[in-house]
Each structure stands twice: as structure tokens, then as C-alpha cells.
Image (cartoon, helix red, strand yellow):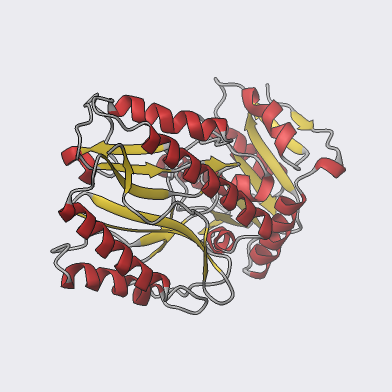
Amino acid sequence: MNETRTAQVDDNNADTEARTRFNRFVATIRDQGFDAAILDSADSLKYLTGYSATAVMYQCVIVTSDGDAYGIVREIDAPVFEAVSWITNFVTYVDWDDPVDLVVHSLRNLGLEASTVGQEFGANFLTVRDYSRIREALPTARFSDLGDIVIEMRAIKSEAEIELHRRAGAIADLAMAATVDALAVGVSDFELVATGYQAALQAGADNNAPRLVLLGMGSRSTHFHAGVTGGRLEAGQPVHIELLPQVNGYSSRLMRPAVYGPVPGNLQTTFDRLVEIQDRQFEQLRPGAVAKDVDRVGRNALIDSRLRDVVPNNTGYGLGLISAPKPGDFNHLFTPGSEWELKENMVFHMYLSASGISVSETVRITSEGYEPLTRTNRTFLTKGD
């Protein structure tokens, strides 16, 4: 049987930043004519309430336009919800209950069965089946998409969020150095990934998504997102290393190529050209710049220099608070059709690649340009003679 619970929260320890964000969210939905909203995206829940729900079973928070918040939480997760969220009113369910039935019941109890309710249609946790069931159970309610309300709020980082990105960037630098230091003829890619993980976790990384280290050796250096195979390193083989550490959910990322022994001339030439092109992109990073214009600088130069015949991917994407299963903020991409403008305190992972060689940085947009949040030397990293 479900029972409504009231958590005892010490206001002095509440997440005041999340509460401030929540109040802004409430004002926005009220201005847009919503009587209530259902938050079920893990990113939105963490950002606005402090609680990061798992993807195992459906959980959400119902928000009313007068600022009340009511959680629907899996019983086993209730202690975490009480510990990290400022929300005091919530109901729990055991694993053989149906959380969607509980959502419907809660909306009725809150007097919202004939109201205008916003939902996160883009959330990974709201399935078509569950959305249909909620609508069918409340035929007089009007359900609409919340759109990009939370997405746009999350795009501009507070100083506290920027500091978390800086800490994650420092961890990425440290783990990169440790991984390169582990390069040796005969070392396996398993060992290199383990070294990166150990260094990052010991330094404070707390990843919940995605993987923390991505690595490819030799011909697999072109495989950005492939898994390791147990292959062993040979002298002169390029190694693609990408670090993706998080601190309290905020990710900074870093890509570099590495090699044991001298860098082959053709690989050094490719890397130097990539750095030159990306530096030209970085000169465009400032508030008011249009994303497609920044992208064009890198994309056209890659093709004009014949480093790439075609560039099917973006050349940068938004970072911030990340929860499983999403690996990044793909609402703000640098592509040929991106019309959105850069704003101060946005954070991006900018990257370029060619022939298995990659370079990337995590950057923050400042009032006059950008701040690099990863600071590993922009060189082809080496170990050995």
C-alpha cells in the first residue's frame, strides 16, 4: 500500500541553488499557461530538485504552478531522495506496484484531472505506452510538451556549476597524464583503460554515465566509441585517448593522441594541422557568435586541407549535468544548420579528428571569448624514446 510521506529536512542543508532554479521553472510554466508539470527526465530532476533517479523504474516529480512539488519515488530509493532533495512531500511504491497508476492517482488527488499539464516529451523515461496510459486515464486533462524550458535553463551555468566543470577538467588532465605514462610496448588496452579509470576515480570522478575512458590503439584509433579488445601496444602505434570524468554529474572531456616512441612524421603533421584549425575555431568563440559559423571554420578547413573528404559529425556539443542514459547535451550542437547563439557561461566539448588522430578541449564561453577547462598541452603525447 502506498503511503504519502513527509521528509524532515534541515533547511540549512537544502540545495538552495536547485531550489532557486526550481522557482524560476515554476514562474516560467505559470507564464506559459501550465497548471502543472511532470518532471521525469533524470537531468531535470537532478537540476531542479537535487535527486537523480535511476532508469530502472519510472519516477517523477509533479510540480504545480503555485510552486508545490510532489515526488513519486521507488521505495528502495526513498532514503536517497530524502537525503539529496529539498522536496519534503512524496509517495513511494514497492516494485510490484505500478508507478503510472500512482501518477494518475496523484494528479487526481492534487485536483489536476482537468488541468493543463506539461510533460517532458523528449525525456528518455517517458515511454509512448506510459504517456498514452496517463492520457487515457485523465481524458479531461490537457497534456502538452514542456519543450526546451529546462534545456535552456541548463545551458547557462552558474559559478558553482562552472567550478564543478573545472574540477572535472583537472581530473581529465590528471588521468590523461597517467594513461600516457602507462604506455609501454606490450601493454594491453585493458591496462591502459584501467590506469585512466583508477587515476580519475582516485582524483574524485563519480561517473554515472557514460564510460569514463574511451581508448583505441592502432587501426582502432578511428573508433571513437568502441570497446577495448585486449590488443597490445606496438612502438609507433597511435593511441586515441578520451577522458570523460564527472564531478557531481558535471562532465569535462579531453581527447589526445599518444604514441610510445617517436611520433611518425605523417601523424605529427595531421595533429599539428588539427590544432591549427581548432585554434581558428576557438578565435570565434564569444557571446553572440552563431554556432554554424564556428562550425564552418573547422568543417571547411578539414575538407579544404584534404584531411577529411566529408565530416558527418558535429564539431562540438554542449556539456553540463549528465545523467544516464544520455552522454551529453545534444540540444546545442555545432553543425552546418545550427542557428543558435553562444552565450556567456555555456560549456562545450569541441573536437576535431582525421586519420585516427583527435584533439579536443572542454571550454567555457566568457564575456569576451573562452576559458579552456582542460589544460593538457596541445601536443602529440609521447612516452619512451
Residue 164 visible in the shown view? yes
Q: Quadrant for residue 33, please give it.
A: bottom right
Q: Position of residue 177 (x, y in %)?
A: 43, 40
Residue 336 visible in the shown view? no
Q: Quadrant for residue 117, please give it.
A: bottom right
- Please give the name of the residue rendered at 41% of the width and 70% of the height, measured from the top-left corner: 282
Name the one closer to the observer, 284 or 85.
Answer: 284
Residue occupying the far front of the picture: 385
Left of 314 or right of it: where is 63?
right
Left of 382 or right of it: where is 121?
right
- Please give the name of the residue rendered at 51% of the width and 30% of the height, measured from the top-left corner: 57
Q: Position of residue 276 (x, y in %)?
A: 31, 68
Tally of numbered discs:
0
Q: Position of residue 302 (x, y in %)?
A: 22, 67
Check the image and report above or below for 381 versus 270: above
- Please give the name of the residue rendered at 40% of the width and 27% of the height, measured from the top-left corner: 194
Check the image and report above or below for 318 versus 8: below
Q: Position of residue 18 (x, y in %)?
A: 70, 51
- Please give the name of the residue rendered at 52% of the width and 74% of the height, measured from the top-left corner: 369
Check the image and report above or below for 98 versus 312: above
Image quarter (top left, top right, bottom left or bottom right) of the N terminus: top right
Name the one closer to the observer, 337 or 201.
Answer: 201
Image quarter (top left, top right, bottom left or bottom right) of the C terminus: top left
